[in-house]
């Protein structure tokens, strides 16, 4: 009898082990990979996840900066051309995700993205360029656009006030370089990016919308309305996204680490 119990116990404990995941952090507009470090979010992640490095994509393909020894539950930070149109950013992200999958072929992928990075991540998902996706977590992302995009477009046409600041504190020369991105962030309509993207089939994975504000009646921030930060307002994702609220401004903050870790803990237990 004892000979049968030992293998049974082994199978029992093996069945409850949490499978390893890989996490990719995607920054937003006028930002870079460093934003996750500057706001202390990676410091919090380091308690349970192993840093895999910063990924950049260039003429010679994807390369990894800050190399580290990858192990179970590894996270990577991508560095994207944040002023570029979102389709171009998505092509960079897709190359980086392929790089990650080559090194973690058996591990489900979780994407956590801030602001416009959330749209970039969704483009990669609907392009079916994400191997074995498990979840998308977005923070203050403009899923159904933002009125600020039109204001920024209008401001970018004004050449006589070079020191003025508009969208997120961006000077006029930055606004001019970002015109394609602002067009991509206009509210969805026939023929524009969000009109197309929000009608596309999305993979059957977990979706989590982290929304700025205290509740459904008092949500949003200085750049993106609360309803736009909720993926349930995307036509193809209605009723499919969990929502969490954080009473803070648009930019990433250290308090985002706690809610992100809580969501990741639940996801990695699945």
Image (cartoon, rainbow, N blue to C red):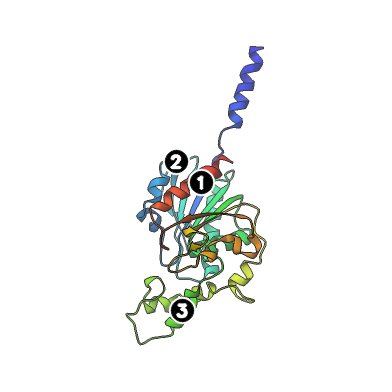
Residue 37 position, x and y percent, is: 37, 53
Residue 151 image label: 3
Residue at horizontal 65%, vertical 62%?
Answer: 236
The image position of residue 252, as x and y in percent, is 41, 58
> Residue 175 or 101: which is nearer the viewer?
175
Q: Are marks 2 and 1 in contact (CB under 8 Å)?
A: yes
| Left-right relation of 94 to 58 | right
**Mark 1 or mark 3, earlier in chain:** 3
Q: CA distance from mark 2 to mark 3?
A: 41 Å
Quarter placement of the N terminus: top right
Secondary structure category for the residue under label 1: helix
Measuring from the top left, give residue 181's x and y in whole percent.
50, 73
**Label 2 sits on residue:** 48
Residue situated in front as seen by the camera: 123 or 71: 123
The residue lying toward the viewer, choosing from 183 and 257, is 257
Which residue carries the number 1 mark? 264
| Image point (51%, 47%), residue name | 263
Q: Please name which of the two marks, 2 or 3, marks the residue nearer to the observer.
A: 3
Compared with 198, 10 (above or below) is above
């Amino acid at each position: 009898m004892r000979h049968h119990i030992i293998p049974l116990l082994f199978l029992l404990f093996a069945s409850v082990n949490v499978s390893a995941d890989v996490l990719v952090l995607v920054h937003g507009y006028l930002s870079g990979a460093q934003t996750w470090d500057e706001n202390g979010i990676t410091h919090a992640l380091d308690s349970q996840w192993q840093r895999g490095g910063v990924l950049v994509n260039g003429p010679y393909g994807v390369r990894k900066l800050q190399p580290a020894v990858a192990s179970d539950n590894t996270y990577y930070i991508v560095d994207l051309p944040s002023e570029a149109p979102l389709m171009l950013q998505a092509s960079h992200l897709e190359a980086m995700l392929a790089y990650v999958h080559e090194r973690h072929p058996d591990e489900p992928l979780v994407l956590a993205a801030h602001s416009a990075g959330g749209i970039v991540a969704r483009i990669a998902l609907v392009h079916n360029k994400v191997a074995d996706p498990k979840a998308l977590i977005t923070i203050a992302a403009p899923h159904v656009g933002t009125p600020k995009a039109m204001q920024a477009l209008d401001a970018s046409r004004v050449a006589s006030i070079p020191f003025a600041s508009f969208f997120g504190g961006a000077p006029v020369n930055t606004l001019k370089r970002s015109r394609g991105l602002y067009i991509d962030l206009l509210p969805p309509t026939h023929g524009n990016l969000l009109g197309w993207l929000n009608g596309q089939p999305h993979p059957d994975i977990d979706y989590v919308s982290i929304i700025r504000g205290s509740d459904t009646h008092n949500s949003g921030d200085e750049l993106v309305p609360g309803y736009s930060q909720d993926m349930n307002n995307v036509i193809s994702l209605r009723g499919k996204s969990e929502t969490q609220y954080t009473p803070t401004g648009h930019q990433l903050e250290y308090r985002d680490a706690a809610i992100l870790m809580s969501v990741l803990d639940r996801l990695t237990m699945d």
